[in-house]
Image (cartoon, helix red, strand yellow):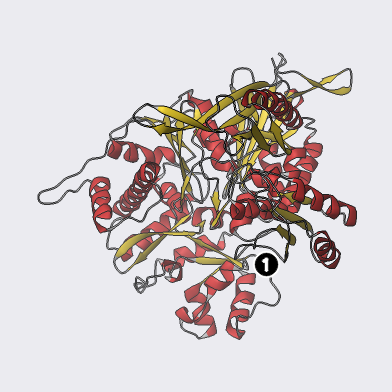
Amino acid sequence: MEHSSTKNLGLGIDTGGTYTDAVIVDIGDGTVMSKAKALTTRQDLAQGIAKAIDMLDHSLFKQVRLLAISSTLATNAVVEGKGCRVGLIVIGHEAGRNIPVDEVVQIEGGHNLHGLREAELGVESAREFILRVKDKVDAFAISSYLSIRNPEHENKIKEMVQSLTSCPVVCGHELSSALGFHERTITAVLNARLIPIVRDLIMSIKQVQEQMDLHAPLMIVKGDGALMSEKVARDRPVETILSGPAASIIGAKALTNLQDAVIVDVGGTTTDIGILRNGQPHLDREGAMLGGWRTRVRAVDVFTSGIGGDSRVVVAGGKVVLSTSRAIPLCIASSSHPIIREKLEALRHVRIRPAPLLSELDTVPQAIDFFVYSKDIPGVDMGPEHHSALELIKSEPCTVLELAGMLNVHPLSLNLRKMEVFGMVQRTGLTPTDILHAEGSYVEYDAVAAQIAVELQARQMEMTSEDFIRTVKTAVVEKITTEVVKKLIFEEIGDAPLDEVARFLIDNMVQGTGRRDLACKLELNKPIIGIGAPVGAYLPGVAERFHTSLILPEHSEIGNAAGAISGNVMESIEMLIRPIKGAVTVENPPCTLFWMQERKDFETMDAAIEYAKVVGSDLVRQRALASGADSVEIVIENRREEARLDQGRGATILLGTDLVITAVGKPRLFFEEGGDNSLGTFR
């Protein structure tokens, strides 16, 4: 279809755990012009991205002025322990335990809270380490004690690394201005580990752009929902962790224009729960927590639960249980492997022995679970029967019962879970996605395979298929509701363990059953916005339990992709100004400025503030322009810290001033004029 009028269009992409979504929107008014979904190809994200883009309306491509992507790549890489080899140089402090590095050294140096040297820098120790490991690592990370009060030691060692190697190098003070040596060290290390991973993704996307003739600047969604240019993302990839959940919240706002809401994004792998307040995503004050590590990355405060369209539905011990482990839905697997439906048909005539309910749900065998070959990994010690099982799976998808029969072993003796963890095989099984296919409310793949699987599992429970579907849907609704309750509780009191009484009250409220003398009800003070393809099936029940309204915006199924293209460019720094020792009671005291580029003394607080505003504004403006902003607005927040000196008189002393300087701007757009590739302005 040809479009006569020229528009400024943006193309947003989100690579989730299961699906890759793509959308073309009118940047001027947010109108969705074309949208598509494709399966995420985890082994090579670019394949899924290319397929999703190819399903869009190609006649619109010439009008695309900007391409933005949110991705789970960095988050998954951190959680799964992937990344390049890193050499860590810590200065003036011991490195914490379990830091994911390959080589580490501690040298003399570091500073105190006043930015003064604690010891002379161990230059020779650093040089010896760099020369020794430069061929054993792919990147360097440098973290000096209290470098946020004086970055000189980190900067000197960075210059040395650059003079002796061609490896990328990152310093802790470049990524965070917050206190916390260990957290800053972790952030620098993770950033270094992610550099080649995110660079490869960017190169792959740019190749897809070339293939699709999409000549628009590429931007990446950061964990706080803002956009950054691909050039900046190459150097600061750690800032893209939690990119997907951030895009979800931005997309919910873009699709509804609401300023305050609870966003529930039901994906294939997980459900993300976030809060929109005053039009902004709520950020984690301490920095993103990921893979067991607390970082200093600015990111949305999102509660992620292991419940999604691909969650494994287990029937065992006379119960229907939702596992947090993921399985490829049978309806999807059967579309690629038709033999799966044939084998499900054959199971209709077989008596299936009930499975025991084990404490570890991932090891509970299911007669309808199939294992599909993925790849060989040399050097994995599995035992001869497992090698034989893998060879059988290579020929066609098999159930654990089939394998046990062919190999003449007990089903529980086959540790297929180990092969699954290593990525050698993939499990396919009954999931909530299959439940919707069997019900007929969402049909995209092989609904017949899903219907047969539901019939077989319902027979185990002595239920009709309709009752089984209703049971699973209720379990999903109650699980999501419980996770939202936990998120809201943790917002108020912090992350804390729930005792027996708390769990009883939550179950009482969520299930709505009450007890002999007590019944509890939930009431949410905000509406719920649903994002994701299956939200229409589950979130009405969630909203009903919360006695609140539910908004299911049009195009909610590609909400994350819409969020990716709807963000602004934003760069922010924090600058600390502290009175010199003994001058806190002076009205305009001499003081010291601490920030990422220097430690500088001033005769008065006013002079320090003026200087900080000028140099800070200049830096964030430059960083925002480098991140792809067209023009920027500077916002300065002055946080004055005081303490009472004498409660009787009400006198106070000045502890210091923190300036938060932020540059915000619309992303720069691409135009073709007379054959030249020039950048235009956003109007």
Picture quarter containing residue 98? bottom right
Picture quarter containing residue 82? bottom right
Circle 1: element type = loop
In the rendered picture of this protein, how many numbered marks are placed on residues? 1
Q: In this image, 28 relative to 214: left or right?
A: left
Q: Which residue is mark 1?
A: 375
Q: Quick check: 92 above or below 652?
A: below
Where does residue 50 sit, x and y in percent of width and height? 71, 42
Where does residue 222 sit, x and y in percent of width and height? 63, 39
Quadrant into which the C terminus falls: top right
Callout 1: 10 Å neighbours few (<14), some, many (20+)? some
The type of residue carrying mark 1 is Lys
Q: In this image, 321 relative to 141: left or right?
A: left
- Of residues 117 and 502, which is closer to you in this image? 117
- Of residues 412 and 631, which is closer to you in this image? 631
The residue lying at 48 percent from left, 66 percent from top is: 369
The residue lying at 40 percent from left, 66 percent from top is: 348
